[in-house]
Image (cartoon, helix red, strand yellow):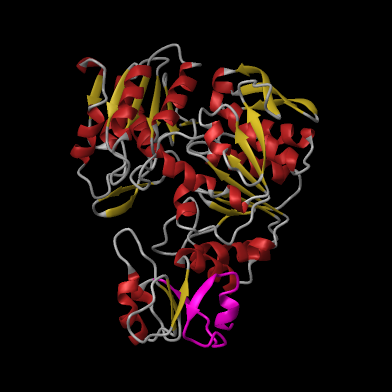
Amino acid sequence: MTLEQLLKGVRIQKTNIDLGIEVSVICSDTRKVTPNCVFVCIKGQKYDSHRAAQSVVAKGAAVLICEKQPEEDLPYVLVDNTRAANTLMQANLVGNPQREFSFVIGITGTNGKTSTSCMIKAIFDKAGFKTGLLGTMKYLIGDEEYSLGEGENLLTTPDPELLFPLLRKMREGGVEVLIMEASSHALKLEKLAAMHFDIAIFTNLTQDHLDFHKDMDEYLECKKKLFALSDKLLVNLDDPSYERIVAGCPCEHKTFSGKGNNSAQYNAKNVRMKGARGVEYELLSLDGIFRIKLGIPGEFSVSNSLAASACAMEAGISAICISGALAEMDNVKGRIDRVDIDAPYSVFIDFAHTPDALENVIKTVRGFCDKRIITLFGCGGDRDRTKRPLMAEVASRLSDYVVVTSDNSRSEEKADIIKDILEGITKPCNEYAVIEDRSEAIRYAMDIAGEGDVIILAGKGHEEYEIDKNGKHPYSEREVVKEHFYRGKN
């Protein structure tokens, strides 16, 4: 492939090199430079690889893609945004597979992305399409999970170096419908610059990721970048930030409301909470009305399933297919996910790691628990510190007993994170406990649980690992629960 072909779609300001040269490798890591590669200079949060321009060329790079013209006499192509250029080049390198799907759906928002994407997949699967899913829990090609290579991290939205080869693999595997979670990180870092979505969904906006975004305004604006890549937007009319979300929206948008707002094009009416058995409601649209039954409990399940149903209807899928797919769905792993033990109390695992998500989960459990709710949670290290006391306030206000523990402490001291959390605890000392070791904390919660009580293990959800100063280690809350329970039975 020529450099000119590789740069198709990239806005070039200036260059001092023949664009007809042959190239085959794109690199943005100074440790992985290979002879005749195209090296993309990227300014990161900690390091600007423009500073390594001379050494990169000395190692054999054929050309630099940069935002700042090198001071030295080096081969370069000057572009507006090297992150966006990298994404476009990665897509060009494998023949732009993102353009070959019958339907591409992007989902953004603070909470509900994973559940909504799984519901959309279930509906399109039942409609006879082969689907691909890229999200927080896993990457799926049909029903087969794509295994990441050694050292690769599963990100909500894959980096371009993985994304576009994976999309090529999906197309070669017969995938017709692509469903993607679009994180604010990915949108800010231009990972999706080469994508085009038939439908975008905005689930909701609450506080998260303020370690990465300077404030909530920037967080929202980054999420809204998805709209410029989309033909149509479905947005939650119930969200308090609705007006800000749709302000200046460059594409057609329609609304959905889980609270019966008659202004919405897709509306949930006569909602019935069935406790642990899920929810039922009538979906009202301009095309008619039909009943939705879903075995996943909670008010947020109404909103998520409504968004998924609206998306499917916009794609022309029948009401019978939609209602049938949702009725057959099992719980989404790590979302109000009950651990199967024969105990007089119940244990639920949930990914809730924001104040809003934690509040939704506890309120959902309150709907079917008439005894105590014991909420166990921690907060991630090297992440938004401001939400730590907010999480504690929610847990204190809505739970009967709180266990504060650790959760992916990363480079921070667990004790320091817990200290931040405790600033928001409002319970008396006999109604909460602090146990730094998460496994020990889980065992403690189980030991104090009585008949009819519900334990919520919040924060990790589908994750099967723990991250601390020494890196990522295998860790399963489900196995901790089962091991402790069955050890007590023997």
Q: Quadrant of residue 436?
A: top left
Q: Is residue 139 shown left or right of residue 433? A: right
- What secondary structure prevails in the magenta region? loop
Tell whether 245 sits left or right of 328: left
Q: Position of residue 306 (x, y in %)?
A: 65, 31
Q: Residue at x 81, y 30 (%)?
A: 287
- The image shows residue 72 at horizontal and vertical percentages of 33, 84
Q: Count all numbered tags in the image, as a single digit.
A: 0
Q: Is residue 42 magenta?
A: no
Q: Residue 321: x, y in percent?
A: 76, 37
- Residue 327 location, quadrant: top right
Name the one closer to the observer, 197 or 474: 197
Q: Most extreme residue toward the top, as rendered?
A: 370
Q: Is residue 136 visible?
A: no
> As displayed, is residue 232 above or below residue 342?
below
In the image, taking residue 402 as reference, residue 263 lies left or right, namely right
Q: Which residues are magenta?
A: 1-28
Residue 49: image quadrant is: bottom left
Q: Is residue 5 magenta?
A: yes
Between 403 and 245, the residue placed more toward the observer is 245
In this view of the protein, can residue 162 be seen by the observer? yes
Residue that appears at 54% across and 57% down: 192
The answer to whether residue 308 is above or below residue 398 is: below
> Percent from the top left, x then y, of residue 267?
68, 25
| 113 relative to 490, above or below | below
For the N terminus, the image quarter is bottom right
